Image (spheres, rainbow, N blue to C red):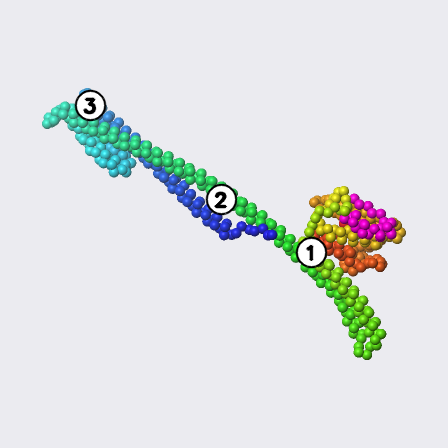
Amino acid sequence: MSAKLNHPSSVDLLFLVSLFVFSILIYQTFKSSKEVVKGIELEEQTYKILLQLDELLSHMLDIDKSTKDFVLSGNQQYLALIQKDITAAGFALDSLRNLTIDHEQNLRLDTLNVLVDNKTKAVQKMIAVRQFNEDTKESDYAIQIQDSQIMDSIRAVLSRSANKAVILLSNRSEQTDTKRYERGLYLIILAISALLILTTAYILMRNNVKALLQNKKLREDLIDELSYQNRQLADFAHLTSHNIRGPANNVVALVSMLNENSPLSEYKLIVSKVEKVSRNLVETLNELLEILHVKNNKDLKKIRLKFQDICKKETENLEAEILKSSAKIACDFSSAPSVVYPKAYLESIFHNLLSNALKYRSPNRIPYIQLKTEAKNGKIFLTVSDNGLGIDLSRFGDKLFQLRKTFHEHPDARGVGLFMTKAQVEALGGKILVQSKAGVGTTFT
C-alpha cells in the first residue's frame, strides 16, 4: 500500500484556524498592553495631581504663615516670601488645570481658583492695613476672621480633592493590575498556542516528509519492478518466438512437402515426423507455461522449512543416481538451518542443482557434492558445490541460464533445470550466481 500524504485541505484549514486564533490573541494582547500603558499614564497623572494639591496646600499655608508673621513684625522680607508663594500657587493651579480632565475635578478647581483669589485679596488687605494703617470699614480683626474662613475653605476643598484623587489612584492601580494580568494571560496563551502550532506543523511536516520518502521508495521499487517485468516479458517473448517458431516452421515445411500426388508411404513418413514435431511443440509449450507460472506466481504460501529436511527428501529422490555414481554428499546447515520459502520452489531448486551435479559428474573421479548455508547481513546464502565437469564461463557464461542451452553431451540434458531454478529464485527477489572452471567443478550460490 502506498503511504498517504496529509490532505492539502486539512493543512490549509489548520493554517486558517491557527491564523484566526493567532490574530485574536495578538489583538487582545496588543489591546491589553495599550490599556496597561494608558492605566500607567493615568496613575502617573493622578499621582501628579496629588503632588500638585499637596504643593498648593503647602504654598497656601506658607502664605498664611508669612502674612501673619508680617502683620506681627512688619518685616519687609516676608513680603517677598508671600509674593513668591502666591506665584507658585498660581503655577500649581495651572498645572492642576492641565492635569485635570474630569468635570467634577474642574468644578473643584474653579472653586479653588476663587478661594485662592479671595485669599490673595485678603492677604493684600492685611498687608495694606499693616503698612499704611489705612482706615477701612472693616477692622483688622474682621479681615483676619475672613482670611481664616477662606483658609479653612481652601483646606476643605484641597482635602476633598486629595481624597478623591487617592480613591481614583487606587481604582486606576487596581484596573491597571487587572489589565497587566490579562496581558500576561494572553501572552502565556499566545506562547502555548505558538508552541502547539509549531509542534503540530513539525509533526505534519515530518509525516509528510516521511510519506514522501516512502512514496519515493515505493515509486522506485515499482519502477524497478516494472523494468524487471519488462525485461522478463522481453525475454519470454524472445523465448516464445525462438522455441515455437522452429517447430511451427518445421510442421509447415513438412506439410508443404506433400501434394495430392504423393504416395501413401510418403504421407506416412511425413505424418510420423509431424507427430514427433507436434509432441516436441506441446512439450515446449508446457515448459513455457510452467516458466510463465513461475514468473507470475509470487504469492505462493511461504512456510518455515528446514534445509536438512528438504535435502534429505531430494537425495532420497535421486538415490539411484547417487548409488550408481558412488557420489558423496556433505551438508552443513548449521549457520542457517531454516528459511521461510515456498516448499515447492525450494524442493525444485535442490532437485535441479543436485541432479545437475550428478548428471555432469567427471568420469575421472568420484562425485563430491557439498551443500552449505550461511547467514550474512540479514540474508541467507545457499551454496551447492561439486567437482564435476565444470563450465567454461568465458565461452558460455552469458548463456548458462538460458532455456534449452546445454554445454555437455548427455542424453537427459534439456537445458531447462537451471533456467527454472533462476526463474524461481528471482521470482521471490533472490539472486543466483555461479563460479565454475572447466574440468574442476562448479559452485552455485
- Foreground residue, 69 or 407? 407
Q: Is residue 52 left or right of residue 148?
A: right
Amino acid under label 1?
Asn
Q: Residue at x 77, y 51 (%)?
A: 350
**Whole-number angstrom distance, CA of label 3 to CA of label 1:** 124 Å
Which secondary structure lies at badge 2? helix
Q: Which mark is residue 197?
A: 2
Crowding around mark 1 (Cα neighbors within 10 Å: few <14, some 14 to 19, many 20+) is: few
Give amino acid for label 3: Lys
Q: Is residue 352 left or right of residue 74?
A: right
Return the residue found at the far right.
Answer: 364
Disc 1: which residue: 297
Residue 283 position in % (x across, y down):
77, 63
Q: CA distance from mark 3 to mark 2?
A: 75 Å
Q: Magenta segment range?
A: 310-332
Amino acid residing under circle 2:
Ile
